[in-house]
Amino acid sequence: MKIVGTIDGKRVSSRELEETIQAAVNGGAHELEIEARGQHGIGGRIWPKHAPVKIRVQGPIGQRLGAMGMMGTEVVAEGGSSDDVGWLNCGAKITVLGDVTNGAHNAGAQGVLYVQGGGGARCDTMTKHNPRFEPLQSWYFRDVGDSFAEFKAGGIAVVCGVNPRHSENVLGYRPCVGMVGGTVYFRGKTEGYSEKDVQLLELSDQDWQWLCENIKPYLEAIDRLDHLPELTRSAADWRKLIAYTPAEKKERSGHRLSTWEFRRSQWEPAVGKGGIFGDMIEKPFTLLPFITTGRERRFKPVWNNEKQLPPCVAVCPSDIPSHHRFQLLRQGKRQEALDLVLQYSPLAATVCGELCPNICMKACSRKVVDRPLDIKGLGRASRDLTLTQPEATGGKQVAVIGGGPAGLSAAWQLWLKGHKVTLYEAGSRLGGRLWQSVEQGKVAADILEEDLARISASGIELKLDTTVEADRFQSLRREQDGIIIACGAQDKEGKGLSFLGPEIHQQQGKIKTNHQGQTNELQVFAAGDVVSRGLPTHLIGSGRRAALALHALLTDSQYHPESRPTIPYAGLKLEYFAFQRGECSTADGGGTTGTGGTGAGTTPVIGPVIGPIIPAAKPADTPESEAGRCVSCGLCRDCHICENTCHYGAISRRDLGAGEFEYVVDPARCIGCGFCAGTCPCGIWEMEENL
Amino acid sequence: MESAQRLDHNSELTLLEFPFIIRWREDRCSRCGRCTAVCPSKAIEASVMAQRLVNSQGDTPLPDTIRRVSQVIRQVNDIDRHCVGCGTCSLVCPNMAIMPEYNPSHKFLFHKNRGGIPYARGGRRNAPGTSTLDKLKFTRISMLTDPSLDAGRHEFHIRTLLGRSLPAEALPIERAGELLQLKPDGFIPPVREIFPIRIGGMSIGALSPPMWEGLAMGVAYLNEVENIPVVMCSGEGGLPPRLLKSRYLKYFIPQIASGYFGWDEIIHALPDMIEEPAAIEIKYGQGAKPGDGGLLMAYKVLKLIAKIRGVPMYVDLASPPTHQTKYSIEEAVAKMIQSVSMAWGFRVPVYPKISGTKTALAVLNNLARNPYAAALTIDGEDGATGAAYNVSMDKMGHPIASNLRDCYLELVRSGQQNELPLFAAGGVGKEANLAANAAALILLGASGVDIGKYIMQAAAECYGDERNRCNLCNLGRCPRGITTQDPRLYRRLDADRVAERVVDVFKTAEVELKKIFAPMGRSTQLPIGMSDGLGVGDQAIADRLSISYVC
């Protein structure tokens, strides 16, 4: 049956031609001859009912010849055809006795395309393979255009490369981009393909067998059987491109040159070993973890025992180390604790116990928890002290002028240092201004007398009722190695200081000294009210400092007045210390599990960490119970908190013998976390930059 | 004596004033101290907590008091030790017991001026939210009107030109029979073909050795293994002689700035150079701190830095805000460009970098007349820094989008848009949209962009963000080891891994640029100034940038 694409010389539309063809096939026609006039889609969508439908097409052919072609349909174009031959082919066998232009077999899934010439651009793109059917075949006799087999997912394409238009590149520019399946056999040269998607291989025996078997019907169909010997001469003339499997692609992508390999093979050979900074940095760039030990720590803990003063000592004009006394009490050394005060003051019971306003207690850190320690009580307990003769022998001769608190303190300290001390007092008894307090009822006479008796019993040579006149002063200056003037407060005219003469600088009844009590004359010191008025405790401290400075001068040693910083309250961990609820003072502690470090007879309870908001009731104090309450600011309590806290066991206690100890850090274990510093009750551990 | 009241809360800040609040879970904490060991700002510390509980367990009231003192992690409420939210504590915590949490209602800046010292920091402008660049959309999609390109299939050439391209009629060439030849005394400016995203100037000194080397190695790898011609600016801290004398120099842009650090070493190395640098950048300004100078603190000037910069150790290194001997734009631009060009025989492109400013057009017009000016880089207000006052970073400078656009349109008016390339910087990739921001700037008229902060964030896990997270760069305490000279910190950073991430970033950016340009139908030429491809859902921005308003 012949169908003509013109009526009265006029072209019929593609729709009308299609309807005619469909009607003919439905009417039982099996062999059609069509004279086309550029109509599109000829030969597609034909579902043969009984026998195969054969369609020969002549004349100018439009686009999409055999598009959506079905099995059992055979289309032969007697000349070249235009774009998209066999588009979405589902089984038609299409033979084009000429060239196909762009997009042949695009998205084809089954069927066969035989091309007698070459293909245009984007042929065999998007082809599929459905496992239900035989794979699609596309055969090109010459070569194909650019972008061949893009996104090919199945089917076999064969490019015979006979008399190619581009003899250097029979597969065109960049074939097989995105190809994931199917096979491309080709004969001839190629200038490249998508190496990321496909691999180039020699033909296997099976490939060659398939090719030899299937090429014959193809060559017959396109009337080129004479080329059979040439095309089947040798498998070596052919090669194939197949897609990498997903697994192969993954494996290949894992093989990118690592930057480490790049450094080793390219970077360092060009710039030098160790990299661009290798000649400037001593140590190699080995990696460090975030958590480091030893020298690589950013911070390190330091056991700063006694590097800071507790507030009580820092404010005490007499420098009395109450915290040390409480520590000795905690160690059960009551007498030593009480005797210790004699190193600082010969008048502890009178002054600390009675007259002193106890600035120490106002500063006491414990008051932040509940109430300050009873340091006055410690003074009161300091009546029965052991007088120990000094072991040291300073060996110099010194005179102290004035037997009041400052003079007594100065003479006492010089005697303790082993000097031969002569004390001149114009009156008939020692004590000076302190007797006024007795008269005022501020202190009982027997307390003062006890303190004075201890001084009298020392080796200080006392010259009572002895006024130092100008002559005596001059002779003292000649005879003595040093003099401390502590003659008490004077009127503004300084009449009482006339014995000094003009050599010792004075102003308005006061002797001018430096901060250590030294006058303008090297070996003449002054202390007490004659320098600056103060409380008895100031006078005692003033006398002590002048004495120690003079001692240093006489023995060619150094005297460093106390200058350590005061530990701030925030530097302590007062949370360890429980608010002491006075009403519990008679309880025996049963029923509570607190460990507030309090002494016997009190029940530890919690209190506000900050601020003395509730005045705590005061239980019966003893020096021992107070010692338990003492925070021990800046002085290691030896409580082992740090040792237990350290997660890495880096802290240990080292016994130094004779009751001495220290806590040490193993740098190999310490990470510099600061837990020791953060949890130390006494503020001993501090973190330092680990330089 | 310390007053007890000092310990009370009368003048303390609550943690709610702080920008980050530490969430610590006592039930999970093992008290191992890893968090406190790594905290860069000492914002957390070990402490103790006392609890008193009264229990009654019997059938009748029978109080049983329990006192418990335990070790805790405490956040410090000292403003100078504020938590910067870096999260290193959570990184090292074995039990997921600790994590800083951003506090949106903080009042940090009210308090961070102690001692009369304004707050200084690293990072960039603290302005979270969508930037103008991120508001721009690519609205011209090739749909049937013209075939779109397939980013996965088509060949792309994502390249730009760094250097002056003379118009055909201005080329100093003449006919010689069948051939063209350069006229005697003719000068053709040097031009480099590079990837349009560059790594902007970050100095050795500002960056740690492994960070700088990691970037440098990544750049070399990209060029030599991946064939992506990325170039990197040195920043103002010189270059190590080993790099100057290597074949890799061609991928680097040495920067000369007002401190002139490292330039004697560069000049000494000239005879030994086997390659010429990609270009030379003259820094006049920086987007993050316009009109402000740089300062490398003495504690960062260790042996390595001293050697490379040619200065003694442990001295503060100031880069003044201006070049000390240049008093006018003519003088500054002409002198500097000419002198620096001479060093390499006018074979290397030389261009200035300025901070974004309303006066950028004046600079541009000057450059347009200078035959040796190779380009202009404008660094917008969102540019990042290693150290600057917060007020400079947050309040000074000009946004890059309109600044760049004005300059480009000015070139269009004078017909020179294809002649003098503009490079834009400052906030590119601020919200991680590197390729999109770069493409937007290219469509507005930039020939390329510079990145800095982005590469630190992407390649070295820099914690910094625009909520002021971390931003400790100025203090040399970078917990990642990026901006520090302390070996204990910078040895945390693996240069090889930085290089690997640099490679990842640029390979990804290239793919994304293709994904943007392909639907717009561009593959082999950058769509510089193709502003009809842009749209924005904000009328004011649309008007200002001369692009379409879309909604």
Image: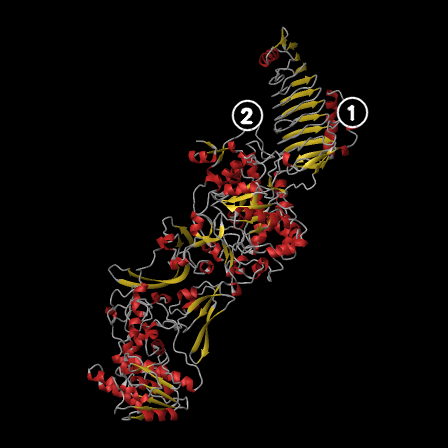
Residue furthest to the left: A440
- Name the image quarter holding residue A401: bottom left
**Which residue is more in the foreground, A442 or A679?**
A442
* Residue A604 visible within the image: no
Disc 2 designates what residue? B145
Amino acid on which the number 1 mark rests in the picture: His
* Residue A372 visible within the image: yes
Q: In the displayed structure, does residue B424 sit left or right of residue A135?
A: left
**Which residue is more in the foreground, A530 or A305?**
A530
Q: In the displayed structure, does residue A322 sit left or right of residue A208?
A: left
Vertical relation: B380 (above or below) A354: above
**Which residue is more in the foreground, A468 or B342?**
B342
**Residue B143, x across and y down, in percent:** 53, 27
Tell me the number on the disc at residue A227.
1
**Residue A681, x across and y down, in percent:** 37, 68
Vertical relation: B196 (above or below) A283: above
Label 2 marks which chain's residue?
Answer: B
Quadrant into which the C terminus of chain B falls: top left
Vertical relation: B423 (above or below) A266: above
